[in-house]
């Protein structure tokens, strides 16, 4: 097994890393300190490791880092900052959608993918969009509220523009 | 931590075919949603993986000589979005919308779903009723195998270690044909099917009788067609009596086993009920259309 130099473009930053072929994108991201990406089940059941890869949400535990060579990767931490959070991040805090926080990054990435395609989703559509993300604390109600709040807010903002 | 393996990254299909090998130590990797899980669980121990998911030659859906041709590395999300699939592969589109979850759908491929050889593969029953074929390519051979002959047992297919699945194809169904898919899972999303059913009515314009096809998943070692039920329905009107009899025959065609997701008896009963329901809806819809 031989290591290879690859490039990972994460949240707008370029990283050159030399990795073995059996390193997953999840492991590579966490080693680069993108620890907002959580390691849950490592088999694609929980969605805690969800990130955007070239604009599509995926489980980073089921992608090899070499497969992401040169790709654009977006994690929850890349959506906003403490000073200027993304509307979803703000709404998750306001709605009490974060308890232990382990699912939050993946939930927000999945919710963002939904709102990108469908700015005014129904509750069913929200539930469907986060169906690959498990939360063991909230019972999902607050998470769904947070996504609905964000959708309303973003539509209002758009209407004002 | 995944076990050690070599990873080859071909840039073209010919390059990939050159890398394939006689031994089963070499394994193609596309979406990885099954394979990487098996590797982690040490259920599969290939020495070399060949990354074919990014090959352009294996992507996309196109029309070719009266066939719909789907590249083997098209993802389930690609199928869900595609207008040709919506029109000419209705049951497949329905299966794509309830397949696993959105994260998995963005990676899992149609070729991988079949190559894995699971009796519960959600793409299989829709493709069976569509009369799909699997295109297999190696460095110096090309063949097309009907899907019914492709999966031969639990996790077994006729794919030779040197062959890659390059495409799945089926004849464009006649205008007015209708396909439906239903899956029974233990929860609404991210479920392995307890059982699944695809039904298709092929509309014959030429005065011939419409043809009905029924396929069942997760109730036998492979996804199956319910041939006896289809024969009974062939050419006759869809009366409640015929439908009930066909549903019974479909259930008798299964070799359901009991497992963590359901007992054999439960599967057989639900197949009867669901086939009856789908055929009844179909009979109603086609009647309404004629009036």
Image: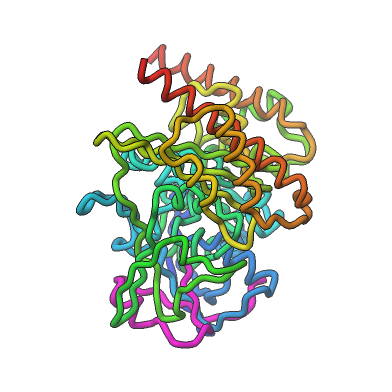
What is the x, y in percent for residue B51?
Answer: 43, 70
Residue furthest left in the image: B65
Give me the residue at 51% from left, 66% from top: B151
Q: Is residue B5 left or right of residue B144?
A: right
Quarter placement of the N terminus of chain B: bottom right
A111 in relation to A15, above or below: above
Quadrant in which the C terminus of chain B appears: top left
Query: Could one spot residue A105 in this view of the protein?
Result: no
On whether residue B2 falls in the magenta region, the answer is yes
Q: In this image, B182 relative to A55: left or right?
A: right
- Asked if residue A124 lies in the magenta stretch, the reply is no
Write down the quadrant of residue B274 in the picture: top right
Which residue is depicted at the point 24% across and 36% down? Answer: B206
Q: Is residue A2 above or below residue B245?
A: below
Looking at the rendered structure, the number of numbered marks drawn on it comes to: 0
Pick out the residue farthest to the top.
Answer: A160
Nearest the viewer among B232 and A156 is B232
Q: Position of residue B84 (x, y in %)?
A: 31, 41
Q: Residue at x 52, y 75 (%)?
A: A21
- In this picture, residue B137 sits left or right of residue B23: left
**Residue at left offset 73%, top offset 57%:** B257
Residue bounds of the magenta highlight: B1-30
Residue B241 seen in render = yes
Which of the two residues, B162 or B14, is positioned nearer the viewer here? B162
On screen, B66 above or below B276?
below
């Amino acid at each position: 097994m031989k290591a290879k130099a690859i490039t990972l473009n994460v949240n707008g930053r370029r990283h050159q890393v030399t990795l073995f072929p059996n390193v997953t994108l999840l492991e590579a991201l966490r080693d680069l300190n993108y620890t907002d990406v959580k390691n849950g089940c490592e088999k694609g059941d929980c969605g805690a490791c969800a990130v955007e890869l070239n604009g599509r949400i995926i489980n980073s535990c089921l992608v090899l880092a070499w497969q992401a060579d040169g790709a654009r990767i977006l994690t929850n931490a890349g959506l906003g900052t403490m000073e200027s959070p993304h509307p979803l991040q703000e709404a998750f805090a306001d709605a009490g959608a974060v308890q232990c926080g382990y699912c939050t990054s993946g939930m927000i990435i999945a919710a963002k993918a939904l709102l990108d395609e469908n700015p005014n989703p129904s509750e069913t559509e929200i539930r469907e969009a986060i169906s690959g993300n498990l939360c063991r604390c909230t019972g999902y109600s607050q998470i769904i509220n947070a996504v609905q709040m964000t959708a309303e807010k973003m539509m209002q903002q758009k209407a004002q523009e | 931590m995944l076990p050690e393996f070599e990873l080859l990254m071909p840039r073209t299909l010919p390059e990939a075919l050159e890398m394939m090998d006689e031994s089963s130590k070499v394994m193609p990797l596309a979406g990885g949603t099954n394979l990487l899980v098996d590797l982690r669980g040490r259920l599969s121990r290939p020495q070399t993986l060949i990354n074919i998911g990014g090959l352009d030659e294996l992507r996309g859906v196109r029309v070719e000589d009266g066939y719909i041709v789907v590249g083997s590395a098209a993802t389930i999300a690609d199928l869900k979005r595609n207008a040709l699939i919506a029109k000419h592969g209705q049951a497949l589109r329905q299966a794509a919308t309830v397949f696993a979850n959105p994260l998995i759908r963005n990676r899992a491929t149609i070729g991988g779903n079949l190559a894995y050889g699971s009796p519960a593969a959600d793409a299989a029953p829709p493709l069976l009723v569509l009369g799909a074929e699997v295109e297999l390519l190696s460095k110096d051979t090309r063949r097309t195998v009907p899907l019914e002959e492709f999966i031969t047992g639990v996790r077994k297919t006729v794919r030779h270690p040197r062959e890659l699945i390059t495409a799945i194809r089926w004849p464009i169904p006649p205008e007015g044909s209708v396909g439906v898919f239903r899956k029974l899972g233990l929860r609404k999303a991210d479920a392995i099917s307890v059982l699944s059913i695809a039904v298709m009515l092929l509309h014959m314009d030429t005065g011939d009788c419409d043809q009905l096809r029924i396929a069942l998943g997760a109730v036998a070692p492979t996804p199956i067609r319910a041939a006896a039920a289809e024969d009974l329905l062939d050419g006759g009107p869809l009366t409640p009596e015929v439908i009930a009899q066909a549903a019974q025959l479909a259930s008798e065609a299964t070799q359901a086993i009991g497992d963590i997701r359901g007992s054999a008896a439960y599967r057989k009963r639900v197949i009867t009920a669901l086939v009856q329901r789908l055929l009844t809806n179909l009979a109603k819809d086609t009647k309404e259309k004629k009036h």
